[in-house]
């Protein structure tokens, strides 16, 4: 059950995103070619969007206003008509979004992996666990510190799914919810010398600042797919559908896929485009 503080943080996050959208709309004319991309914090915190979107803008003359929030908040922004398209990482949620008629279609873009990070001593024995669900169960059984996003993001949704795979999350004193993005949550986990679930891209971006390190990754249940979702224009006629489709096609093109694959931090590849694997 979420605490009152966590619910307040979720509401504050969504309000901040809505205010950011409003400021974008005030600051640009109605006829200016601008797109509102609601996305997860990992695409922003990893530095990927800063690396590739200027190319799209230069090629098309369309400016992309990025609103980086948790995946759940991105869905809510889109439902409220405050996004032209989404780039998020919760496949089940994305498919449900389309099935409900809010979104028009979903396209695969890329994947990376979730990882469980923790202190060097690994008191819960996470590194020897065979599955991520078992690793979380060991953390709880050891009473070790664990920092959750707690913000209905794609990462938080995956964490809840992993708990469900081992019978649900028990209550213990060391479990904390940050209610913040991935970068901030990593810093909190590092300060507490705690375990944390993160995406690999954000971890690599912050690796030089962290004492906690990766203990478990590369298992099937930690695969982390990202999809682009276009809005249903019959339901949201104000959506800039042509430019949104243009961006979706650009993100899934072989040329952009190569740019995504070439984006590295300290020599490590952060994301793997599906187009290059077909």
Image (tube, rainbow, N blue to C red):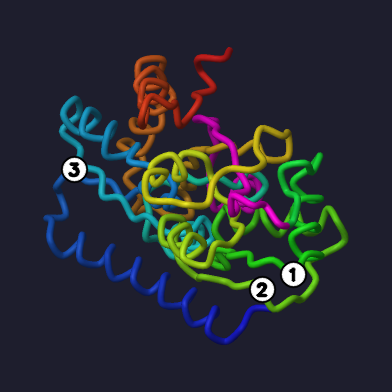
Residue that carries the numbered disc 1 in the rendered image = 143
Asked if residue 250 can be seen in this view, the reply is no
Say if mark 2 contacts mark 1, CB within 8 Å. yes
Q: Position of residue 37 (x, y in %)?
A: 35, 48
**First reached walking from the N terminus: tag 2 or tag 1:** 1
Q: Residue at x 47, y 77 (%)?
A: 9
Query: Is 55 positioned to the left or the right of 187 in the image?
Result: left
Any mark on residue 210, and which?
A: none
Any mark on residue 174, and which?
A: 2
The answer to whether residue 117 is magenta is yes
Span highlighted in magenta in the image: 94-123
| SS type, badge 3 | loop
Q: Position of residue 161 (x, y in %)?
A: 74, 54
Q: Position of residue 229 (x, y in %)?
A: 50, 42
Classify 179 as above or below 68: below
Mark 3 packing: few (<14 Cα in 10 Å), some, or many (20+)?
A: some
The answer to whether residue 119 is magenta is yes
């Amino acid at each position: 059950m979420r605490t009152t503080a966590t619910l307040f943080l979720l509401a504050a996050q969504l309000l901040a995103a809505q205010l950011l959208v409003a400021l974008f709309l005030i600051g640009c004319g109605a006829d200016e070619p601008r797109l509102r991309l609601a996305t997860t914090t990992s695409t922003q915190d990893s530095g990927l969007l800063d690396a590739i979107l200027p190319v799209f803008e230069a090629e098309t003359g369309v400016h992309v206003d990025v609103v980086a929030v948790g995946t759940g908040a991105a869905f809510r922004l889109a439902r409220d008509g405050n996004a032209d398209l989404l780039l998020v990482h919760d496949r089940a949620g994305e498919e449900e979004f389309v099935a409900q008629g809010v979104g028009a279609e979903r396209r695969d873009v890329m994947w990376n992996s979730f990882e469980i990070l923790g202190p060097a001593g690994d008191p819960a024995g996470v590194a020897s666990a065979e599955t991520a669900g078992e690793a979380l169960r060991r953390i709880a059984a050891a009473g070790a510190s664990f920092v959750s996003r707690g913000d209905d993001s794609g990462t938080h949704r995956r964490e809840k799914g992993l708990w469900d795979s081992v019978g649900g999350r028990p209550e213990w004193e060391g479990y904390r919810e940050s209610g913040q993005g991935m970068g901030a949550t990593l810093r909190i986990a590092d300060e507490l010398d705690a375990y944390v679930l993160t995406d690999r891209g954000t971890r690599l971006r912050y690796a030089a600042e962290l004492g906690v390190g990766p203990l478990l990754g590369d298992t099937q249940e930690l695969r982390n797919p990202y999809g682009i979702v276009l809005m249903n224009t019959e339901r949201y006629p104000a959506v800039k559908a042509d430019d949104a489709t243009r961006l979706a096609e650009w993100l899934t093109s072989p040329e952009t896929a190569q740019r995504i694959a070439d984006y590295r931090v300290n020599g490590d590849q952060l994301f793997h485009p599906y187009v290059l694997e077909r």
